[in-house]
Amino acid sequence: MLTENPLLERLDDALDNSVRLLADGSYSGSQPTTPASVAESTSTSSEAADNDNTTSESVSDDASWSFDDSTRTNYSSDDEDAKPQLEAHGITLREHLLEQARVTAHTTRDLGLLTVLIDALNDQGYLDESLEEIHAYLPTELDIEIEEMSSALKLLQHFDPVGVGARTPSECLALQLQQLPKVPFVIRRLALQIVDDYLTLFAQRDFNKIKKALDCDDEDLREVQIAMQRCYPHPGALFVSESTDYVVADVIIQYGKQGWYAALNSHVIPNLRINALYANALRNSKSEGVLSTQLQEAKWLIKNMRQRFDTILRVSQAIVERQRNFFTHGAVAMKPLVLREIADTLGLHESTISRVTTQKYMLTPHGMFELKYFFGSHVATETGGEASSTAIRALIKQLIGEENPKTPLSDSKIADMLAEQGMVVARRTVAKYREILKIPPVTLRKAL
């Protein structure tokens, strides 16, 4: 709309203070809008609106002409604003390995073989194809022997990061265990034997079978576990650059004299107004042309933007009033809540509440949450009341966090403990909530 409609402009445009390149090659920073100029322009826009007789509705209605957050703080531009920092290009796994290959290879032939193997690695640093498969698609006129490929692979497996070039997780861990410093010889040998023959049992924490097969005790296995925790199952993942997605809160929860209340985040509200220059041109022309239509569109957008954020605030405040215990005590105090309750309270349709709470975030003393987080199904209690499924998941997480690692709680035991607190929850429901929380089962939580 800002691009297509000249009557609509945004005061908080991020490009207002950007540095622009002129025709002669010099730089020019656009002048920032000062509070005085904003006030003057707003006054001019209001005067033009008061004299406009081309529209059927009164143009003196400020709500329909501007959407300006008066509480927005005006920050002066500094070095960080004028010249934003650019993220440096991160080195990739291939680039890191090729640098080592150039200073390690003795001949051009060795460098070529290392390059072929490096190009065959996946993002995790593993060699998916066998040496025979890689050797098969090499040109026959190079007369490369499979032994040369094997020697190049051994050299590659000594590069940084340790474990790169492995073909299986067992080989990757073995390469790292062989080079781990400050590991006793007995523990290193036991760890290598477990990695080669009993890695699946070790991952499943079936320590009794391992102790019988290798004739070792809990202390030895504990030392092996500590050594393995220093290894990286996916060494190449250290070089995978992932962009971080930041969530900006639409609503901020604060505590005042009247208790908890919701407030809109002023930095997410676009500061819109009618362009005074085009408004004056429309007033002087006194026509019903394109500008008149665009004026109505601009007024419609500003009005609906205000209504949109007003609805978000009303829904957020209604959530706060029903979940006050959450903001004071945390997720364990969450009450059951459905969309229809908020819809009936505010006099809105249930689908409207669903849209308002989707991809809208609330900043609370306990963290950032999507508005949908505060809605949960009802679970019956022994006293005939109801508990929120969110509160039950929080209790399950709390119980598992306080369990003895040597004797972790089973799903049945957790269900019994919840029943003692008056919450009737089946074992399969506990298992479902545990999976939602991404907590492993009891066998994988057992520690030595």
Image: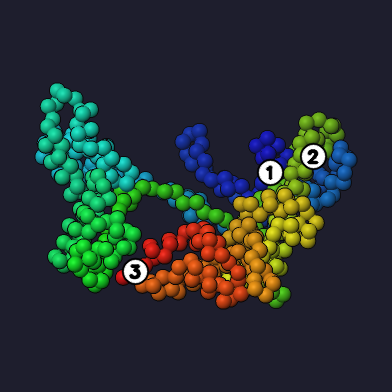
Tell me, for residue 374, which label it has, or none.
none
Disc 1 on helix, strand or loop? strand
In the image, which is nearer the foreground, mark 3 or mark 2? 3
Q: Quadrant of residue 257?
A: bottom right
Left or right of 440 on screen, residue 215: left
Q: Can I make out residue 152 in this image?
A: yes
The quadrant the C terminus occupies is: bottom left
Crowding at mark 2 (Cα within 10 Å: few <14, some 14-19, many 20+): some
The residue under the point 51% across, 44% down is 19
In the image, which is nearer the foreground, mark 3 or mark 1? 3
The quadrant the N terminus occupies is: top right
Give the percent coordinates (x, y) of residue 164. 24, 48
Q: Distance between the residues labelled 3 and 2?
A: 68 Å
Give the percent coordinates (x, y) of residue 444. 38, 62
In the rendered image, the vertical position of residue 264 relative to residue 101, given as above or below: below
Marks 2 and 1, the one that precedes in the sequence: 1
Crowding at mark 3 (Cα within 10 Å: few <14, some 14-19, many 20+): some
In the image, which is nearer the foreground, mark 2 or mark 1? 2
Tell me, for residue 9, which label it has, or none.
1
Marks 3 and 2, the one that precedes in the sequence: 2
The residue under the point 64% across, 52% down is 358
Crowding at mark 1 (Cα within 10 Å: few <14, some 14-19, many 20+): some
- Camera-nearest residue between 371 and 363: 371
Q: How far apart are marks 2 and 1 (CA)?
A: 14 Å
Q: Name the residue under label 3.
A: 447
Q: Quadrant of residue 445?
A: bottom left
Amino acid, disc 1: Glu
Marks 3 and 1, the one that precedes in the sequence: 1
Disc 2 on helix, strand or loop? helix
Left or right of 195 on screen, residue 32: right
Q: Name the residue under label 2.
A: 296
Amino acid, disc 3: Ala
